Amino acid sequence: MDASLEKIADPTLAEMGKNLKEAMKMLEDSQRRTEEENGKKLISGDIPGPLQGRIQNIGEQGHMALLGHSLGAYISTLDKEKLRKLTTRILSDTTLWLCRIFRYENGCAYFHEEEREGLAKICRLAIHSRYEDFVVDGFNVLYNKKPVIYLSAAARPGLGQYLCNQLGLPFPCLCRVPCNTMFGSQHQMDVAFLEKMIKDDIERGRLPLLLVANAGTAAVGHTDKIGRLKELCEQYGIWLHVEGVNLATLALGYVSSSVLAATKCDSMTMTPGPWLGLPAVPAVTLYKHDDPALTLVAGLTSNKPADKLRALPLWLSLQYLGLDGIVERIKHACQLSQRLQESLKKVNYIKILVEDELGSPVVVFRFFQELPDSDPVFKAVPVPTMTPSAVGRERHSCDALNRWLGEQLKQLVPASGLTVMDLEAEGTCVRFSPLMTAAVLGTRGEDVDQLVACIESKLPVLSSTLQLREEFKQEVEATAGLLYVDDPNWPGIGVVRYEHANDDKSSLKSDPEGEKIHAGLLKKLNELESDLTFKIGPEYKSMKSCLYVGMASEDMDVAELVETIAATAREIEENSRLLENMTEVVRKGIQEAQVELQKANEERLLEEGVLRQIPVVGSVLNWFSPVQALQKGRTFNLTAGSLESTEPIYVYKAQGAGVTPPPTPSGSRTKQRLPGQKPFKRSLRGSDALSETSSASHIEDLEKVERLSGGPEQITLEASSTEGHPGAPSPQHANQSEAFQKGAPHPEDDHPQVEGAESLR
């Protein structure tokens, strides 16, 4: 940059270059101090005020681009003559550099903030060039001979509508050219079909005006056959405009022939800001036209100095980076994409969609696995029984898994700049476009290796989830009280809904009781701390609540999972029903208790008589002849909701003082797990963990655990077997009797008795 500034003859530019040197020196000194203090590069967090910590790391070249905006404001205050010379020099230098870097000879440049604005100006220029009387007659000329703008079916969404709105043209002026479906890429424009459409439009009295080709589609980075399209446009007098991310490769030493043909087009739009990691840098539209009057009318050129100063940030950044720096950044992005593409070719179940594009800086891939006895296109059942609805369901299911994979990779490797997108033919895919993100995020080769490692780590979960879905469906359908919900957009093993007693299947209204049960079920399952994730379905997917079960590993015990869901839901329903009926049951119990108390008082009056109720007479009678009143109590059973007498309790209290209460029954879903084993995991018995080389102690521990899992019934059974029949002798008495039968000494002899006792011990 210093050498180029010294060659500038204009004193104003020389003075500006001197000031830029001082500004860059200040930036370098600030960076050096920051590195010495913190051992880090200069980041935007050093900016004081509300911007601190909120701006991404823009680097030195980013500071240079931002400096151009403030510098342009100062330059605009110069006198008109100096301002005119300075802006003309900046615009011409930037245009010349861009044309040389990207091999576009004898071109002009238009700098604009909106990326699509350049194409709109080019369309206006094409209209002025093809319609000579457009300036005078205006819309009447277009009405008599309607213009036609051809767009690829793989073009950016909304591009055609934007052009019609800016130009004031009706939508029938747009013509979408289909892409190849039988031969070639599915994202390349069908040249033969385009020629047929052009001939049909000419026969109808229309004017083929402009064709927009792609050098790297917005979705997957495919490049049209630009050389063949250029020949077709020259034949019918159509303006050819090219755009796409692959235009950045024109700065490299080796360029594919399809992209190199873009240098012969009439115009092209480039975005050097994302390619080079430059913030607030305008997009550039390079074009070739000989009539300056028409370019002025179309808005591609302007006499205003402020419009020419749009190139100043890019002018400063290009000088700061230099040709080597520009080529190095674009080359680094292309190497990252090639590195990822070569690594993914070695990974199973990953399909790359742009393998036929040589040197494309875009890598698009997706998870793809063919299950046994399945059709190659997203099928999981035999082909003869596959219906169109089943094909669509499997397609949505695979798309959900790829969407989950993309979101996981974005969180694990944020420096990769991945995006998840939906393609019409392939479905949901993951896109890696380092040309648009690497310079800003600072993506390195290590990040690509980490990305591949994360993909390989997620593949077992994806495969096992895809295989366990059918088993989960069968288990749910075989379990009473559970309903399987088919939701192919959910990236998990399945969706289940618990059908409670008051569930109205035919009604589509909201179910408050079901929502309460599913909310409690979600809380109980999350408390188990398993590897599974559980969620309640969003309202827009289903009017009734459902339980969404997430991704599962290969050792997942689906039967135990379904059994736990059903048992837990039933338990929650019973508890909620008991609590809801408690108020009514207690109210009825109180009423019955009041009636019972009234009857008891009436019976007591009949037994004691009227005389005993008189205060003085009653006390005398009670003194001479006391009444033997029995204690009559009542107990309220909440479970049965009825009053019961307390006489059985008082009668059997003394008799049952030593009776042991019955053991609490354990649930059928309770499963004995080894220490450290999480819920819903298959047991180690029968697996590879218990091989022939396993220790015997480990097997004994498993057998002990299984014996202990038998519960108190087994322990009670063993104890009862040792006690034997009440009339049978105990083991100790049996041993003693056997010893005496063998001729043991008489008990009166002390020493022999002691020796016999010792021998018995």
Image: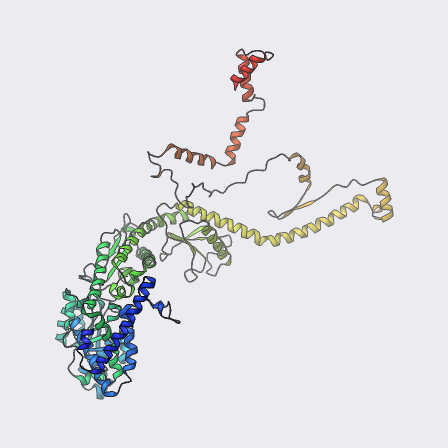
Of the pair 585 and 677, the residue shown nearer to us? 677
Q: Specify the color scheme.
A: rainbow
Determine whether 265 is above or below 731 in the image.
below
Q: Is residue 31 left or right of residue 88?
A: right
Residue 355 visible from this viewpoint? yes
Residue 504: x and y in percent read 48, 56
Picture quadrant of residue 267: bottom left
Determine whether 219 is above or below 494 in the image.
below
Determine whether 636 is above or below 164 in the image.
above
The N terminus sits in image quarter: bottom left
Q: Is residue 5 left or right of residue 624?
A: left
Of the pair 220 and 67, the residue shown nearer to us? 67
Of the pair 367 and 635, the residue shown nearer to us? 367
Please tell me which residue is depicted at 61% across the width and 12% down the height of the picture. Answer: 748
Residue 566: x and y in percent read 46, 48
Picture quadrant of residue 755: top right
Residue 204 visible from this viewpoint? no
